[in-house]
Image (cartoon, helix red, strand yellow):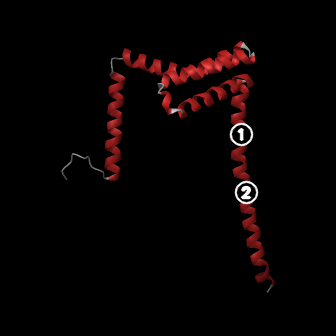
Amino acid sequence: MMETLTAPFQRLSEKMDSLQRDLNEIRNVFVSVKNIIVAIFSFLGQETSVLLFCALLFVFLLNLIPFLFLGKKLRYYAGLAFGVWLSFKFGYAFLSTAKFILIMLLPLLVELTLAWILKKTGGAVKAGLKKLWKGMISLVRKMFGRKKKDDPA
């Protein structure tokens, strides 16, 4: 008789322990993500982080104004100029401004480097990537039974 009375309480206790373990795991994931973000921003430094945040916010606001008809690169360079202007206005250190400029120009540098590599290889890399892409598409079609649009069957 005592066993029938204590069994529901034991199940409830086990479920509460399981819930507590799950909540601790979720908390640990959030703490890990927070620590990574804090490490990145502490590596960048407070001034550079502020400049990046303000410049990206400025670029975001420029993208919301459709009647300006500014090109993508022009909006990006306007955000870069805004960040440099802010660094001089706030009197930030030259190193913070240099890190900000480097971080903002990294996507452009990567794009120019890839274009240079593709130009120097004479299109061999591009052709290889095209073949790889077509091979992956045909593999997915075979796996899921999809046929090409021009297939009569």
Q: Amino acid at mark 2?
A: Arg
Classify mark 2: residues with Cα within 10 Å, few (<14), some (14-19) or many (20+). Answer: few
Q: Amino acid at mark 1?
A: Lys
Height in image: 120 above or below 42? above
The circle drawn on residue 93 is: none
Q: Work out which quarter of the rendered image holds the N terminus and state it.
A: bottom right
The image quadrant that residue 78 belongs to is: top right
Height in image: 71 above or below 18? above
The circle drawn on residue 34 is: 1
- In the displayed orientation, state which residue is furthest to the right: 2
User: What residue is rendered at 72% in x and 47% in y?
Assistant: 28
Classify mark 1: residues with Cα within 10 Å, few (<14), some (14-19) or many (20+). Answer: few
Observer-nearest of 113 and 127: 113
- Write down the residue under mark 2: 21
Say which of marks 1 and 2 sits in front.
Answer: 1
- In the displayed orientation, state which residue is furthest to the left: 152
User: What residue is rendered at 31% in x and 53% in y?
Assistant: 145
Is any part of residue 27 visible from this angle?
Answer: yes
